[in-house]
C-alpha cells in the first residue's frame, strides 16, 4: 500500500512543484520590493506573476495549490506509518 501512496506522492509533487515555487518566490520578492525597495511598478508586475493572471489562472490557482498541498500532506503522512494499526503480539 505504501508503494501506491509513494507513486501518487511523487506524481502530485512533480505536478505542483513549479506553481508552488513560483508562488513562494514571487511572494517573497513582492514583500522585498514593496517594503525595502518601494518599487510599486515591480510589485504590480510580481503580483501578476504571483496570482498567475498572465495565464488567466487567477481563479483556479489557489484551489490547485491548496488541493495539491493537502494531497501531499495526506500521502506523506500515510507513508510515515504514524496512523497504521500495529499488531498486538
Image (tube, helix red, strand yellow):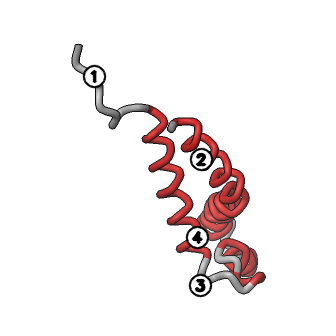
| Camera-nearest label, 4 or 3 | 4
Determine crowd level at label 1: few under 14, some 14-19, many 20+ residues with C-alpha closer than 10 A.
few
Measure the alpha-carbon separation of dots 2 and 1: 26 Å
Q: Which residue is mark 4?
A: 64
For marks 2 and 1 on the same chain, the one whose residue lies earlier in the sequence: 2
Which quadrant of the structure image shows residue 61?
A: bottom right
| Camera-nearest label, 1 or 4 | 1
Measure the alpha-carbon separation of dots 2 and 3: 25 Å
Q: Which residue is mark 1?
A: 87
Label 1–label 4 contact, CB within 8 A: no
Q: Quadrant of the C terminus?
A: top left
- Residue at coordinates 68% horizontally, 81% vertically from top-left? 57
- Residue at coordinates 68% horizontally, 54% vertically from top-left? 17
Q: Secondary structure at mark 2?
A: helix
- Residue at coordinates 72% horizontally, 86% vertically from top-left? 56
Q: Secondary structure at mark 4?
A: helix
Q: Which residue is mark 2?
A: 9
For marks 1 and 4 on the same chain, the one whose residue lies earlier in the sequence: 4
Say which of 49 and 9 sits in front.
9
Q: Which mark is residue 59?
A: 3
Residue 53, image x and y in percent?
Answer: 70, 83
Residue 32 shown left or right of residue 85 in the figure: right
Determine crowd level at label 4: few under 14, some 14-19, many 20+ residues with C-alpha closer than 10 A.
some
For marks 3 and 1 on the same chain, the one whose residue lies earlier in the sequence: 3
For marks 2 and 3 on the same chain, the one whose residue lies earlier in the sequence: 2
For marks 4 and 3 on the same chain, the one whose residue lies earlier in the sequence: 3
Residue 52 to residue 75: above or below: below
Residue 85 to residue 16: above or below: above
Determine crowd level at label 2: few under 14, some 14-19, many 20+ residues with C-alpha closer than 10 A.
many
Asked if one can make out residue 4 in the rendered structure from this viewpoint, the answer is yes
Q: Secondary structure at mark 1?
A: loop
Amino acid at each position: 500500500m505504501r508503494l501506491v501512496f509513494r507513486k501518487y506522492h511523487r506524481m502530485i509533487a512533480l505536478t505542483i512543484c513549479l506553481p508552488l515555487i513560483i508562488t513562494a518566490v514571487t511572494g517573497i520578492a513582492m514583500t522585498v520590493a514593496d517594503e525595502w525597495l518601494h518599487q510599486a511598478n515591480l510589485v504590480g508586475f510580481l503580483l501578476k506573476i504571483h496570482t498567475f493572471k498572465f495565464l488567466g489562472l487567477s481563479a483556479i490557482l489557489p484551489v490547485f495549490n491548496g488541493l495539491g498541498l493537502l494531497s501531499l500532506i495526506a500521502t506523506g503522512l500515510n507513508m510515515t506509518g504514524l496512523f497504521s494499526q500495529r499488531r498486538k503480539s
